[in-house]
């Protein structure tokens, strides 16, 4: 009878599976914005042309959703030195919208921050003031339209 048990030395000799993206052989570059350990559930959102830009969204234990990472097709970007450079217009816009330039970690994985950190003393920003003014105008117009009815 053959034994189905394996010795511990045989287990140590087995190769471990590499983490996705760590070998640089995939179809996408991964730009990580937040640690995946902060999230309990994940969804992918394909943006623009199918298979080019993919947003990986995560759900926190509190129930809020946020972007965990972006997947950029290798057709739409390339590596120069330690940074990721967009080739397509969508990839360029995505990389410019990030708070920092994506820095190479290993393989196909890059790290970046989601948005620039604006100190509280510089708030409200001009964009926030403009958005508030537009929202107030819309609300007043809606109230005026309801009064006429």
Image: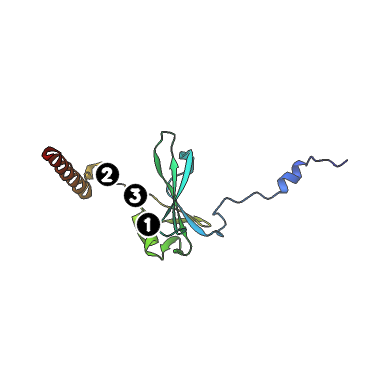
Q: Please say if 68 is above or below 91.
A: above
From the image, state whether disc 1 or disc 2 is nearer to you. 1
**Left or right position of 116 against 54:** left
Q: Please say if 97 is above or below 10.
A: below
**Left or right position of 149 against 48:** left
- Badge 2 density bin: few <14, some 14–19, many ≥20, Cα 10 Å: few
Residue 80 visible at all: no
Q: Is the Cβ of the residue at disc 3 closer than 8 Å to that at disc 2?
A: no
Task: Measuring from the top left, give residue 60's x and y in whole percent.
Answer: 43, 37
Residue 119 marker: 2
From the image, state whether disc 1 or disc 3 is nearer to you. 1
Q: CA distance from mark 1 to mark 2?
A: 23 Å
- Read off the residue under disc 1: 94
**Left or right position of 131 against 80:** left
- Read off the residue under disc 3: 115
Quick one: SS at disc 3?
loop
Quick one: SS at disc 1?
helix
Closer to the camera, 29 or 58?
A: 58
**Left or right position of 20 against 134:** right
For marks 1 and 3 on the same chain, the one whose residue lies earlier in the sequence:
1
Task: Measuring from the top left, give residue 41's x and y in whole percent.
Answer: 48, 40
Quick one: SS at disc 2?
loop
Q: CA distance from mark 1 to mark 3?
A: 11 Å
- Badge 3 density bin: few <14, some 14–19, many ≥20, Cα 10 Å: few
Task: Measuring from the top left, give residue 68's x and y in whole percent.
Answer: 44, 46
């Amino acid at each position: 009878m053959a034994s189905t048990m394996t010795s511990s030395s045989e287990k140590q000799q087995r190769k471990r599976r590499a983490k996705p993206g760590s070998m640089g052989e995939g179809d996408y570059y991964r730009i990580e914005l937040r640690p995946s350990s902060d999230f309990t559930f994940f969804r992918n959102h394909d943006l623009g042309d199918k298979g080019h830009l993919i947003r990986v969204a995560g759900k926190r234990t509190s129930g809020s959703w946020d972007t965990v990472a972006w997947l950029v097709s290798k057709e739409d970007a390339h590596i120069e030195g330690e940074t990721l450079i967009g080739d397509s217009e969508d990839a360029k816009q995505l990389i410019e919208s990030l708070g920092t330039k994506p820095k190479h970690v290993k393989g196909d994985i890059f790290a970046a921050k989601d948005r620039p950190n604006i100190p509280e003393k510089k708030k409200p920003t001009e964009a926030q003031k403009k958005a508030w003014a537009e929202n107030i105008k819309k609300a007043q117009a809606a109230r005026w339209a309801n009064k006429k009815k």
